[in-house]
Image (spheres, helix red, strand yellow):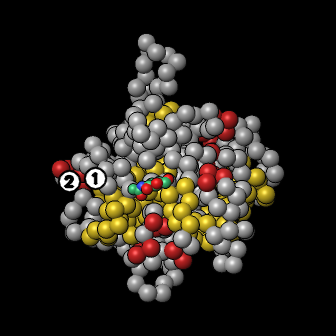
Amino acid sequence: MRLLLSLYGAALFLKGALATPPHTPHGESPDEDGKYWIYGEGIAAAFIPYGASITNLIIDDKNGIPRDLVMGFDKASDYPKDKSHPHLGGVPGRYANRIKNSTFEIDGKTYRVTANENPTRKHPDGLDTLHGGVEGWDWRDFDVVSHTDESITFSIVDPDGKEGFPGEVISYITYTMGNLTWDAKMVAIATTKKTPIMLSSHTYWNLDGFANDETDTIFDHTLHLPYSGQRIDVDNILIPTGKILPNPEGSVNDFWSAPKQIGDGFKDPEIHGNCGFDCTGYDNCWLVNRPGPHDWRADGAYVASLYSAWSGIRLDIYSDQDAFQMYSCNGQDGTFPLKSTQGVDGRNADKRHPHKPAQTVPQYGCVVLEVEDYIDGINHPEWGRLGKQVFGPGSDPYVLQISHRFSVDTDDA
Ligand SMILES: *[C@@H]1O[C@H](CO)[C@@H](O)[C@H](O)[C@H]1NC(C)=O
Ligand SMILES: *[C@@H]1O[C@H](CO)[C@@H](O)[C@H](O)[C@H]1NC(C)=O
């Protein structure tokens, strides 16, 4: 196995994972797969204009083997073709997560946006709006406005009335790599009318680079949400009811009292129905309750920390946002292919179907970590979030900041 792994590592290195990939043009242009690479100390990542999405994020694990930690496609051109469209690594917008009944009110006027989830006979388009509607931001090509060795900036102009939202919104998304860090800064301004804005980063993680030869799930990943003693109550289709629930110590949704393996929650029958009707797993919005004024960048003040002992890779997420969504890939069904930079030699090889992708993402094979504001806060003025969710020409800009800080175990026991 070790030999295979080092061959794999060597191949990856030759393909140009970490150091200075020979096939990766530094500077303005994308590589032959349509990806824009940027580099930090011990880290490299690639992005595409489609959804301003991250497609690859590579760091060395505790054995020095490069691991690609995010789900995606090998080629940029595959993203718009994929019918399942799981919002892979993109920026959901202009309003992330769900909008109840696809409606909201601003200054006494009701707006209706395109429905795209939970279709019924009476409502064939759906009962609600997920991630900005039928053609939300992560279905569109952003412009690349700048690209250096360390950073890339995308922009989008979202026209008045698109998907039913009022007013034009102009947004800039800047990604920067540092010393084992990936930072994201998202700024949006409403130029003509008052409108809801809520963004996020919808990245699918597996800290083993989808290459763990002992398990293909993230049940062994340890999660810590130190400020998240509460979560937003949702109904059967994951629409907030308005209630804020406590997460009692030891309960399925308690990740605050101590770091816990994600799989631990699955031993408790409460996990059934935890993510909506007939759904087993997590797709929940935890509040991030920080007492009073705070410096979100302060060392140790992460809103979430994810760790895998197998790779020795830890991801601490710092953010200025006040809520946090975690999705345990309940909806994955083994059809989504891994990238050529991922996988375990020989796993699931199917000689009878040589054209089927041998390695795919199984249910619970990944975890999505989304910093955001209170979901559907525009329909719950009682939560007091309107100042952070409704923007107009006269208001401050919308700003979201994330710092992903990685560290790797050093002693290979
Ligand atoms: C849902 O929205 C429609 C307008 O599109 C409205 O007529 C209806 O009353 C709303 N239903 C609920 C339950 O709010
Ligand atoms: C990166 O961070 C590590 C640990 O904090 C430090 O030892 C190292 O000098 C840093 N590297 C650079 C190039 O700043």
The quadrant the N terminus occupies is top left
Q: Quadrant of residue 175?
A: bottom right
Task: Determine whether, in the image, residue 162 is placed left or right of residue 361.
Answer: right
SS at mark 1 in the image: loop
Q: Residues within 10 Å of mark 1 (few under 14, many from 20)?
A: many
Determine crowd level at label 2: few under 14, some 14-19, many 20+ residues with C-alpha closer than 10 A.
Answer: some
Q: Residue at x 49, y 67 (%)?
A: 378
Toward the left, the furthest residue is 269
Label total for image:
2
The residue depicted at 50 percent of the width and 58 percent of the height is: 103
Task: Name the residue nearer the viewer: 324 or 160.
Answer: 160
> 282 left or right of 346?
left
Q: CA distance from mark 1 to mark 2?
A: 7 Å
Q: Give the quadrant of residue 383.
A: bottom left
Helix, strand or loop under label 2: helix
What residue is shown with label 2? 270
Amino acid bearing label 2: Glu
Q: Position of residue 298 (x, y in %)?
A: 51, 79
In the rendered structure, the answer to whether residue 271 lies left or right of residue 408 reads: left
State which quarter of the image contains the C terminus. Answer: bottom left
Left or right side of 129 for 257: left
Residue 121: which numbered mark, if any? Answer: none
> Which residue is painted at 37% across and 73% down in the image?
227
> Can residue 221 be seen here?
no
Q: What residue is at 52 percent from the left and 82 percent from the top?
A: 295
The x and y percentages for residue 336 are 48, 34
As drawn, 370 above or below 114: below
Q: Please say if 292 is above or below 409.
A: below
Q: Amino acid at mark 1?
A: Asn
Let me know if residue 294 appears in the view: yes
- Badge 1 is on which residue? 274
Q: Are marks 1 and 2 in contact (CB under 8 Å)?
A: yes
